[in-house]
Image (tube, grey):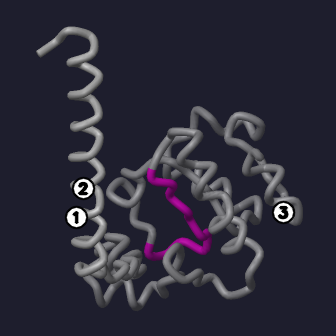
Amino acid sequence: MPLREALTQHEVSTTYERGWSKLSNGELLDAAEREGFALMVTTDSNLRYQQNLGHRRLAIVVLSSTSWPRIQRAIVPVVVAARQSVDNVDKYAYLAAPSEIAENDYNLNIPRYVDTLEEEEEIDLKAVRAEREKLKAELAKLEEEMEVYLKELGYE
């Protein structure tokens, strides 16, 4: 499902549809704020380095890829963030106040604001070892059977 269709409660426009495709990043952000947009979704990962975003009223979601399959996996968290009145979505989005960004020396690295780490599942080493022993026994049995078949076919 395209992102536009997922954001049914919102007005969705592309820069091309608005006639903004030739605007620089700063001009684009100004135009979006002037028109009253609350959220801009982009794949321009360099935007934070090219623009001072601390004074912006516009929330910006930067998708980590231009690959459509990867973007499709991000649709749900983007929609959740857009639909919630709270702008924080655990593991996906955090609305940092301009003062907080200033306290962090305008460092916009995502891990500074959003904890994306997942707890790793605990591995039962005894079960893994038992499974490994079982597989080794099965392999030995199959090799014995294969040896019999090879002898029958004249390969020794």
The region drawn magenta spans 54-64
How far, Cα to Cα, is label 2 from label 1?
6 Å
Mark earlier in primary sequence (3, 2): 3
Q: Of tags 3 and 2, which is closer to the observer?
A: 2
Look at discs 2 and 1 and give the one toward the viewer. 2
Please state which of residues 5 and 136 is positioned toward the viewer in this rendering: 136
Disc 1 crowd, CA 10 A, few/some/many (<14, 14-19, 20+)? few
Q: As displayed, is residue 42 above or below residue 146?
A: below
Q: Residues within 10 Å of mark 3 (few under 14, many from 20)?
A: some
Which of the pair 121/57 is nearer the observer? 121
The mark lying in front, picked from 1 and 3, is 1
Q: For the residue carrying disc 2, how many other residues have a C-alpha within 10 Å: few (<14), some (14-19), or many (20+)? A: few
- Residue 128 versus residue 116: which sits nearer the camera? 128
The residue beneath circle 3 is 10
Q: Which residue is mark 1?
A: 133
Which residue corresponds to mark 2? 137
Up/down of 154 relative to 110, above or below? above
- At label 2, the amino acid type is Ala
The quadrant where residue 150 appears: top left
Where does residue 14 sit, x and y in percent of width and height?
Answer: 71, 42
In the image as oriented, which residue stretches furthest toward the right? 9
Helix, strand or loop: magenta stretch: loop
Asked which secondary structure carries label 1, the reply is: helix
